[in-house]
Image (cartoon, rainbow, N blue to C red):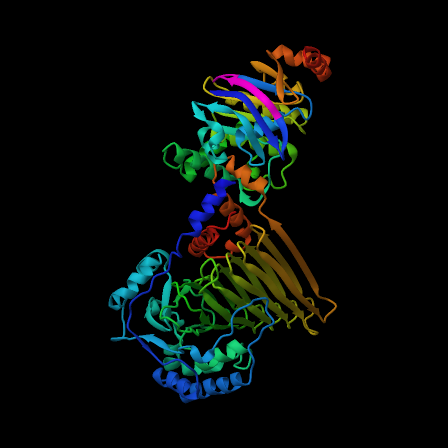
Amino acid sequence: MLEIRNLHASVEEKEILKGIDLKVNAGEVHAIMGPNGSGKSTLANVLAGRPEYKVTAGEAIFESKDLLSMLPEVRAREGVFLAFQYPVELPGVNNTTFLRTALNEARKYRNQPEISAGAFLAMLKKKMQIVEMPDTLLSRAVNEGFSGGEKKRNEILQMAVLEPRLAILDETDSGLDIDALRIVANGVNKLRSKDNAVIVVTHYQRLLNYIVPDFVHVLYNGRIVKSGDKDLALELEDKGYDWVKDETVTAK
Amino acid sequence: MSNSELTVEKLANEQYKYGFVTEIETDKLPKGLNEDVIRLISAKKNEPEWMTEWRLKAYRHWLTMKEPHWSNVKYNPIDYQDIIYYSAPKKKQKLNSLDEADPELVKAFEKLGIPIEEQKRLAGVAVDAVFDSVSVATTFKEKLSELGIVFCSMSEALQKYPELVRKYLGSVVPYTDNFFASLNSAVFSDGSFAFVPKGVRCPMELSTYFRINASETGQFERTLIVAEEGAYVSYLEGCTAPIRDTNQLHAAVVELVALDNAEIKYSTVQNWYPGDKDGKGGIYNFVTKRGACRGINSKISWTQVETGSAITWKYPSCILQGDNSVGEFYSVAMTNNMQQADTGTKMIHIGKNTRSTIISKGISAGRSNNSYRGQVRITKKAENARNYSQCDSLLIGDKCGAHTFPYLETNNPTAQVEHEATTSKIGTDQIFYLNQRGISTEDAVRLIVNGYCKEVFKQLPMEFAVEATRLLSMSLEGSVG
């Protein structure tokens, strides 16, 4: 589904990603872990096409297409979804209108007819149960005045509505209490299927108790320095990131 | 961001959609203004003697006045002798229905996307179509007349209801009021007149579509709306204008009178030609709009969506004379490219327990300049007056300007006056967030701007709100960079 080869990227002339190689197949869940400043969020944002991040070398092939040459909105319509670490507030923009506009953009791109307001609402009600979201949040402006947990749930609701091929969760667990964490993780699990893939970017192993990954990669200083299965996350929890840092130094 | 640059270029090259000229034979006077021209206008319209005299008094007063320059707009001097003051489509005969209207005219309305036929059928709107200064079609008149409601052109009103016109004309905006209002009083060509008698609730929205057509014709509309005791009326005004190279002057006057327990809702969508992207051409819109809440518990509400004109100079105001009377002003003013807008309101509190609300949303894009200018005056006798003002500015890009000039004058200690103002920019993080959900940058800006204007749009009647949203989207084209 996604193949990243030798990806280099920088922000304001500073190189953050220094050669990432990663292959993600349909049906897989990959966790990207690593200490602060290792480049986890940069990787997530580069894949989504945030304009402040400049790709300096390498490529990312998504479903046989060159992902990095696409506009951000085209990547989204192709099925790449980023759950934001800091969801943005859009004052006055109705949450339901926003969701329906987003879905219809994707449908237009796939030559599907636009979904009617009635059909959309019915579908939305079902999807809301996945993240245990109260109806009241639908009539409000996107993320405006939402609590941290509500914002993150709203991200997963958007994911549920848009049904992406590849979902990238950027530190979705940050700032969540244990109940919110469970709700968000359950939401993601319900959306897992053999046809889609998830990349979970996280600092802590905690989230991986709920979203069990097939692969765990450790990002350090802009490179993936270690890959393994879910046990690697536990080992990291146990030994801390210094262990990986030391190993990297020794390997040099 | 090659993405948005491309979009900007593509959209900037798009022509003003409503830029076409309709071929209709016009009957017009030579350029210039003097007492003979005014007498001729009055004679052509077969006006009563007092009307001619009133126009002349206005003209003589106007000659003593100087064009005001206190507003935050810049433009080349206007040569008032280089303007044609009267232009009317040549009428073959009186029209009973639209079928009898000039087919060119009907086509023009169709091009504008506002076919009168559709309007009649869909919305139950009575349309008084003002086409280059003279009304050519008026519908639903019978239905309205059964209720005793008068809705016709000012010319017709002067023929049929001269005493009503005489009683109220100039009673809110006297001919001495200001430079442009005096000029209008002297030369006004036509406009709308609505009168809703005591206790009658007008069952449909009254609507007028204005359109400047003949080249170099200044248009001077005069509108008067009177709601007697307990009456209610909602009036819609909307306009579009074709591309012109020379600047066109538009100096309208609108007067509203609400007696005891009466309510007038006046909504405007204004889309005069704003000039090209370098500011060439475009309409100068110098308008005086004022409503008098004369009676107790009366209410006047102005809602405006301004997207057009090269220059807008406009302050729809309320004089809250009656005790417990209410004044409201909801405004969206959008400027793009080289447009300049200096707009706002005046709320003059005179009666006891009078209340006013001001919600102003300015949007500036391109190299445009957008100013809010508002006055709230609480007079000595206005016990327990209340005002709430909220003035927001939204900036798109970094070459435009937004300014707020609030004037507050409180002469009664019981007054409660609140003023809030904000300035914001559309953030790149907001755009990226919407991009990441599959929404293009253009559409992202539209969503954000529509969200920002929601408080005002919801004041508009349904069909009008749709049109306003469409106009705003059109005005936003090419604004993202």
Residue B26, percent across and down? 31, 74
Kindly identify the residue that appears in the image at 47 percent across and 86 percent down. B54
Location of the C terminus of chain A by quadrant is top right
> Left or right: A188 with respect to B140?
right
Residue B266 position, x and y percent, is: 49, 65
Q: What x and y, as percent, mark residue B372?
A: 60, 62
- Which region of the structure is painted magenta? A17-28
**Residue at (60% x, 55% y) in the render:** B393
Q: Main secondary structure of the magenta part?
A: strand
Asked whether residue A26 is drawn in magenta, I would say yes
Depicted A41 relative to depicted B125: above or below: above
Q: Quadrant of residue B282?
A: bottom left
The mark total stands at 0
Closer to us: A146 or B395: B395
Mark yes or no: residue A156 visible: no
Q: Above or below — where is B258 with respect to A117?
A: below
Q: Is residue A214 above or below residue B474?
A: above
Instruction: Check the image and report above or below for A84 versus B248.
Output: above
Q: Quadrant of residue A147?
A: top right
- Residue B280 is a magenta residue: no
B227 or B391, which is in the foreground?
Answer: B391
Identify which residue, A159 or B312, lies in the foreground: B312
Q: Going 38% across and 61% down the picture, which residue do you hit?
A: B125
> In which quarter of the view is residue B20 placed?
bottom left
In the rendered structure, the answer to whether residue A83 lies left or right of residue B144 reads right
